[in-house]
Amino acid sequence: MRILSANLNGIRSAATKGFFDWLAGQQADFVCVQEVKAQAADLSVAMQQAHGLTGYFHFAEKKGYSGTGVYAQQAPQQVITGFGVPEFDAEGRYTELVYPGFSVISAYFPSGSSSEERQQAKFRFLAAFLPHLDQLAASGREVVLCGDINIAHTERDLKNWKGNLKNSGFLPEERAWLTDLFGPRGWVDVYRRLYPEQEGEAYTWWSNRGQAWANNVGWRIDYQIATPGLAATAQCGSVYKDQRFSDHAPLTVDYSFSG
C-alpha cells in the first residue's frame, strides 16, 4: 500500500506546475492533500478524478483558504469531514476516509507564524485535536494521519534550529505536543521510524524567502503518523524534490499493510 501526502499550496497552482502529471506515474493507493485553497466548483474533472483515484474533500468556508482532501482507488465506507470543533471545521482542516478496520486522514494543522492570534489558534487546535487522536487510537482500528503538521519535532528536523527556538513551528510547547503523541500516547512518526538519523533529505518545506530552497534550509513539517500496528508495516519512504509543485515536497511511504 502506497500513501502519498502533499501540501499543494493551492490545488490549481500545483496542477499548472505538473502535480497531476507526476501523480500519474506514482501508483499510489491514497493521496492526501492539504491547503487546496479551492471550492468544489473550482475543481476540474482531472482534479476530482486523478488517474483512477477519486478525490474526497473538506473545503474551507473562506474562499481560497486551507482545505484538505484524500484521493483513493477504492470507495470508502464513510467520508468524515471535520473532527467536531466548529472553529477548525470551518477551515476545512480534516478529511477522513473510513474502511473496514482502517482509516486514512488528511489533516492541515494551523500555522502560527503570521501573528500571535494565529499562534493561539494553533494552540487551541492542538488541545482540541489530542482527544480526537486518543479516540482514534482507542478504537482498535489502524489509522494513518497524513499532513502538514506545521511543527518540526527535533533539532534534526530543521536546518536552522538554533535560530528558530522562539519561532512558531519549533516552540517548546509545540514540540512537547509531538513528544507526548509519539511517546505515552503511542502514535508513530513513520518516516522517522524508518530513518531515525536522517536530516537534510527529510525536509519537506522551504521558505520562499532568500535562498532557502537552493541552500536546503528546510523544515520537516509534513508527516505520516500511524497507529503502531500499521506503522510496523512501513517499508520505505521518500521525499520527492526533483520537481517543485509548491513550497512543500510530497512525502511517500510504502506499507505492507493490506487492510
Image (cartoon, rainbow, N blue to C red):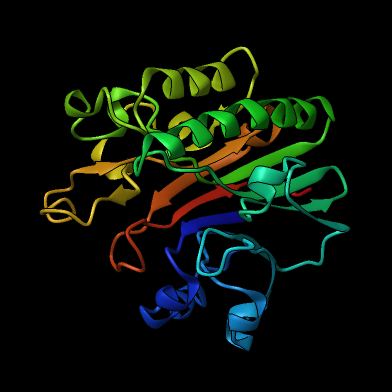
In this view, which residue lies farthest toward the top? 184
Q: Quadrant of residue 160?
A: top left
Residue located at (57% from left, 46% from top)? 146
Residue at 64%, 20% in the rendered image: 186
**Residue at image x 76%, y 46%?**
103
Q: In x, y percent, where is residue 76?
A: 83, 60
Q: Give the residue at the far bottom of this rendering.
A: 45
Instruction: Locate residue 122, reporting x and y percent.
Output: 50, 35
Q: Is residue 76 above or below residue 102?
A: below
Residue 187 relative to residue 152: left or right: right
The residue at the far front in this view is 117
Q: How many marks?
A: 0
Which image quarter is the N terminus in? bottom right
Is any part of residue 30 visible from this angle?
no
Observer able to see residue 152: yes
At x 46% / y 46%, what residue is drawn?
237
Q: x, y (%) of residue 109? A: 53, 43
Q: Nearer the viewer, residue 71 or 148?
A: 148
Left or right of residue 64, residue 83 in this image: right
Coordinates of residue 124 in the picture (x, y in percent): 58, 30
- Figure check: 38 above or below 188: below
